[in-house]
Structure formats: C-alpha cells, structure tokens
C-alpha cells in the first residue's frame, strides 16, 4: 500500500496504480473507500470502464442494488461485451434479491 500511495503521490493520474488500490480496497471490503476511489478515477478517465466495475461491486456489496445496476450499465456503454456486467444484469433482471456474478 505504501508503494501505491507513493506512486499516486508522484503521478496522481496513474490509472494503473488506482486500479491496484481499488483491488486492495475490494479485498479488504473497504466499500466506502472503494466508492470514493472509483468516482475519482471516473473524473479523470471517464471513458474507462474499470472504475465503474469497482463502483458496481461496492454498491452491490452495500445493498445499493439500483446504483450497482446503473454502474454496470455504464460498464456496458464503454465495454459492451464485458462478461461481469452482462452476467450481473442477466442474473438480476427480475430478481428482488440481487446475485453477484463473481
């Protein structure tokens, strides 16, 4: 984590470093931090879908299923063949208890 913080401090727009940080937050289930990081990533790289994937996972994990669905729809607008987003939306098309495709 120290290395990633140093990388981001040196180059705040280092998208790969942010992706690695997001993976750490996800593994540690730091959902509020993952949401905040995902939104920062979207601010400077809105065309990239990865930030929306992490946001969708965090929203789903915290029970914000509508927000998760919307984030996955954003993924598909950037990466139409994304398997995770497609699977989530298909599994949860008519489901009141959403299922995570992971």
Image (cartoon, helix red, strand yellow):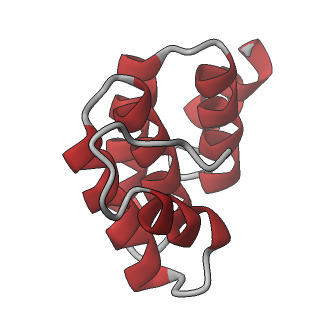
Image quadrant occupied by the C terminus: top right
- 45 left or right of 13 in image: left
Up-down relation of residue 98 to residue 90 (above or below): above
Residue at screen point 69% across, 52% down: 16
Residue ID at (33%, 50%): 95
Residue 89's spot in the image, x, y percent? 42, 65
Instruction: Name the image quarter holding residue 82.
Output: bottom right
Taking 7 as reference, is 53 left or right? Answer: left
Query: How many marks overall?
Result: 0
Q: Quadrant of residue 11?
A: top right
Q: Nearer the viewer, residue 97 or 22?
A: 97
Residue under the image location 30 percent in, 27 percent down? 63
On the image, the x and y values in percent for residue 19 come to 64, 45
Q: Out of 54 and 42, give the one closest to the viewer.
A: 54
Residue 87 at x, y percent in the picture: 57, 65
Above or below 61: residue 95: below
The image quadrant of residue 4 is top right
Viewer-proximal residue among 53 and 45:
53
Q: Position of residue 62 (x, y in %)?
A: 35, 23
Picture layout, residue 66 above or below residue 79: above
Name above or below for residue 81 compared with residue 31. below
- In the depicted view, which residue is nearer to us: 81 or 98? 98
* Residue at image point 23% right, 47% down: 67
For residue 51, side relative to residue 18 (left or right)? left
In the picture as drawn, the residue positioned furthest to the right comes out as: 3
Assign the N terminus to one quadrant of the image.
top right
């Amino acid at each position: 984590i120290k290395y990633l913080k140093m990388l981001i401090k040196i180059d705040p727009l280092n998208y790969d470093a942010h992706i690695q940080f997001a993976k750490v937050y996800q593994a540690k289930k730091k959902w509020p931090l993952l949401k905040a990081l995902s939104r920062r990533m979207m601010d400077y790289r809105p065309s990239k879908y990865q930030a929306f994937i992490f946001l969708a996972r965090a929203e789903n994990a915290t029970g914000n299923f509508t927000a998760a669905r919307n984030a996955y729809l954003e993924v598909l607008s950037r990466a139409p063949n994304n398997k995770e987003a497609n699977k989530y939306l298909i599994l949860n098309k008519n489901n009141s208890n959403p299922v995570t495709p992971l």
